[in-house]
Image (cartoon, rainbow, N blue to C red):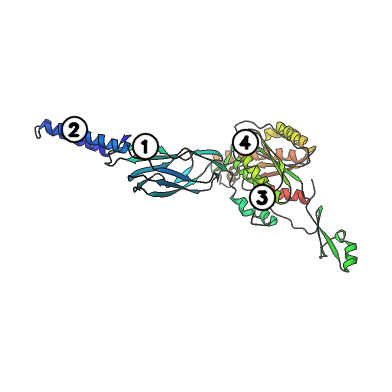
Amino acid sequence: MSPSLLLPLLCVGWALLGIACSAGWLPLAAWWGAGGSLLAVLLVDAWRVWRLALPVVTRQLPDSLPVGVEREVLLAFDAGARPLRMDVHDLHPSGWAAQGLPRTLHLPADSRTQVTYRLRPTARGDARFDGVQLRLHSPWRLWRRSVVAGSPQPVRVFPNFAPLAKLALLGSEQASRAVGAHIRRRRGEGTDFHQMRDYRVGDSLRQIDWKATSRMRRLISREYQDERNQQLVMLIDTGRRMLAQDGELTHFDHVLDAALVVSYLALREGDAVGLLASGGERRWVAPQRGAGALDVLLRASYDLQPAPVATDYLAAATDLSLRQRRRSLVMLVTNLRDEDIDDLLVAVRMLQQRHHVVVASLREEALDAVFEQDVNDMRGALRAAATARYLQQRAAAHDALRAQRVSVLDVTCAQLPGALVERYLAIKREGLL
């Protein structure tokens, strides 16, 4: 219970009445009578607001939400036998951006009122709505009563899977191009037999099936497709380097989104996909294929968060070598620095004993922005020189990996999905697994 703005004004009026009585303008009994009446009114109004029946509050919201996507939340209020005037604020998770709250409602007696507001989750993981905060106004507007109505509601915030839904409407090649991968077209080559068809200009002689040609009395070619039933393991860094931020999302959020995109396309190609998170929080999902595999990956990774700890690449490689015995394409996504190269080289050599390894090294967009600015003072010159030195050391680390026959991708967060998909398809096309 708390007083409204009207109550202090009435008290000020009663005090002015006391001054008038002290000056002899009014009898003292008038001040006592006004005070007694005011006290009676306050007590009656407080009793009435205390006895007001709370409305039944329900919230309509999906159990799972995508991060960074604005959604509409519906609140429904079922009033009792008395009309209500109240202020409403939903107790959504802290830090989420909300539009349309708080607001004041007038609920007629025995009525159902629905209101909506817009809400945008800003972080993945498990979250909780603690109820709906109501501030009831007393019938005479002297008191306000604050209560929490409705039941708590847990929600899960997943990576933004809207791009995956759009990719589902496209063919494999169109979906690959949609994420920025540059696909080199080819015809008739591959490792798995696909179909017989008429010879086309440009087909190699080794594609011609001479028995079928003799039987059909025209040139017939065999057409092959990329080998299926291979395995892809996404090895993602959950250490301190992934805490860097480009835009509203951390590098780890960008990495997770890109990993889900390439995993989705790999599943469409008939391959099995697994995931190992290492560095901070650890998590393992064994490679699996089929329509439900992406859902398993989403549920296993939606609450992963990077931690401010150094990543032990050798421990991650050892863990993956023990868990994944079958030869696979391992895509390690991290933010490589020159001081990491010795440990990473040892880890990569261990993985290369059985697997084909690709290292995707994220580059902060702020580094590219430095060279797009004009240098007009000493501070700008020092910034440009330091950035150039850092990028030179970074390039040296990448060259050390390439010397070990490791495929290295030096990309920004925006370029990461297309680069991963392009390299995955190139490795399948070249039959490196």
Query: Which quadrant does the C terminus fall into?
Result: top right
Q: Nearer the viewer, mark 3 or mark 1?
A: 1
Is residue 15 among what the camera can see? Answer: no
Disc 3 from disc 4: Cα separation: 21 Å
Q: How many marks?
A: 4
Query: Which quadrant does the N terminus fall into?
Result: top left
Which of marks 2 and 4 precedes in the sequence?
Answer: 2
Residue positioned 31% across, 38% down in the render: 49
Is residue 318 among what the camera can see? Answer: yes
- Within-10-Å neighbours for mark 1: few <14, some 14–19, many 20+: some
Query: Please, what secondary structure does the residue beneath circle 2 have?
Result: helix
Which of marks 4 and 3 precedes in the sequence?
Answer: 4
Q: Residue under circle 4?
A: 241
Which of marks 1 and 3 precedes in the sequence?
Answer: 1
- Within-10-Å neighbours for mark 3: few <14, some 14–19, many 20+: many
Specify the amino acid type for callout 4: Arg
Image quadrant where residue 398 sits: top right
Q: Nearer the viewer, mark 3 or mark 2?
A: 2
**Front position in the image: 178 or 72:** 72
Q: Residue under circle 1?
A: 146
Which of marks 2 and 3 precedes in the sequence?
Answer: 2
Disc 4 from disc 2: Cα separation: 69 Å
Specify the amino acid type for callout 3: Gly
Which of marks 4 and 1 precedes in the sequence?
Answer: 1
Q: Residue under circle 3?
A: 418
Q: Residue under circle 2?
A: 36
